Image (spheres, rainbow, N blue to C red):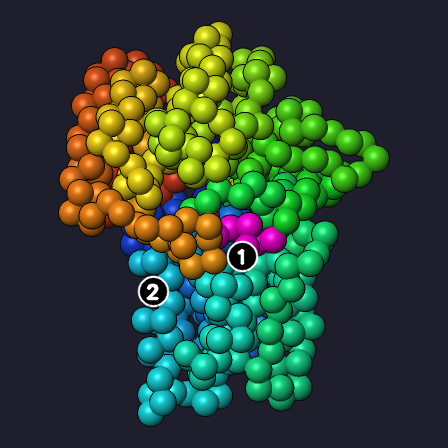
Amino acid sequence: MGIEFVQILPASGPRVPSDGAPAEQPRPATEAPETAENPAPTSGKLKTFYIETFGCQMNVHDSEKVAGTLIARGYRPVDNFEEADVVLYNTCSIREKAAQKVFSRLGTFKKGHRDNRKIIGVLGCVAQQEGDRFFERAPQVSLVCGSASYSKLPALLERLEAGNRRVTGLSLDTDECFETELTRRDNPFRAYVTIIEGCDKACSYCVVPMTRGPERSRASDKVLAECRRLVDAGYTEIQLLGQTVNSYKDPSPARLNFVELLTRVAEIPGVRRVRFTTSHPSDFTPEIVRALESDPVLCDHIHLPVQSGANPVLKRMLRTYTREGYLEKINCIHSAKRAISISTDIIVGFCGETEQDFEQTLSLLDVVQYDQIFSFKYSPRPNTAAGKWADDVPEEEKGTRLAILQDRQREIQFRRNQVLIGREFEVLVEGYQPRLQQAVGRTTGFAVW
Ligand code: SF4
């Protein structure tokens, strides 16, 4: 295939391979460097913790910060829940299946099997959504905390350590971001940096505004200082995160907009790649494309969730753009001076989606020629506007539409990948996939090799 595998290693060089990566992820080639950003576990008679994360990159990074908070309080991470004094589940409620997983995990600690010395905590979206009800459904739980209250975690832990049986952090009334002195990062090359938390949009199918609270941007000087520390610590790729990352509004006197912040991060000496996710189409501007064109450090990949290609569905989803408006943004990306790969999220079988609506989504795939799609069957979520509407596309039909959509995308991707044969790309090797017996990495366009 003429592909060059270039292993970009952190300045500290390779270390012992880690076996603790989730099964679906390639095994990291090295562990994360030990720095103030990524403190080494301290040995000795410390309390121990285990944290399992479900859901999106925001959750993964929140867990890294929660782990840093615990380590700063003298806790030591362990690889399995049996050994842990504190067991935390960072939950996701975007789909019902994800939400159910946490209750199945908690089943392990049911009466009779329960180790009474353990503190069991539930964090994230399901925690926020269920609130105090968690204690009724799962009496073994002592801590329930939503992401908007993570800055209160040290105080909540203190109360648990002082013998309180149940504590909660559920307020959404905050303008604070979760700042941590320490962050325990799992990936030795790519570092996540949250620049905006919460969401001010109101998509009718989505729980995030209810579970993560209103939008709060971090001050640009804090973001830039964190990025500089990461580069100094040897990280080569920085990924800026936010539920709507391009809605960033700098609260500091510098008042940087998203593109200015992005550009400043890319200018940090030593950084090799900068990514960002997830962009909302309504806040996507041509300036973002111009920035990518002019700075090769900014990766040539944009994730722009469309959800549906049909205007009536977009309207019911309250996505605040039309098919035509979305395609204008796509045309802008297509007309960039260098090729930028595009990925998206699509929901099939949303309330009232007709056969014609679905055909519109299929035709959008043909027009845009995505490099990758993440597609799902709609499932109603509690506390959402759409959760109260008739979920009127039968399950079987949703399954059929999903299969047709994925087949269409497979054909598109196959054709697009054919064009790449014989070309050379720089690949950041992220690990070794034992099943395939090969190294696995990504191009700057986010293609997996
Ligand atoms: S933009 Fe819409 S889908 Fe994305 S987090 Fe906000 S409400 Fe949810």
Task: Say which quadrant the N terminus sits in.
Answer: top left
- Ligand 1 lies under 8 Å from the Cβ of mark 2: no
Which region of the structure is painted magenta? 206-213
Q: Give the secondary structure at mark 2.
A: helix
Left or right: where 250 falls relative to 54: right
Which residue sits at x=49%, y=75%? 133
Residue 294 in percent (x, y) is at: 58, 13
Residue 164 in percent (x, y) is at: 62, 86
Q: Residues within 10 Å of mark 1 (few under 14, many from 20)?
A: many
Give 152 or 43, whichever is nearer the viewer. Answer: 152
Which residue sits at x=32%, y=32%? 373
Mark 1 residue type: Thr
The part of the image, by quadrant, that contains residue 422 is top left
Q: Which residue is mark 1?
A: 211
Q: Nearer the viewer, mark 1 or mark 2?
A: 1
Task: Say which quadrant the C terminus sits in.
Answer: top left
Q: Main secondary structure of the magenta part?
A: helix
The answer to if 207 sits in the magenta stretch is: yes
- Ligand 1 lies under 8 Å from the Cβ of mark 1: no
Residue 33 in percent (x, y) is at: 54, 49
Q: Give the secondary structure at mark 1.
A: helix
Q: Which residue is mark 2?
A: 101
The answer to if 403 sits in the magenta stretch is: no
Which residue sits at x=42%, y=79%? 138
Mark 2 residue type: Lys
Q: Residues within 10 Å of mark 2 (few under 14, many from 20)?
A: some
Of the image marks 1 and 2, the number of the one nearer the N terminus:
2
Left or right: where 23 falls relative to 61: left
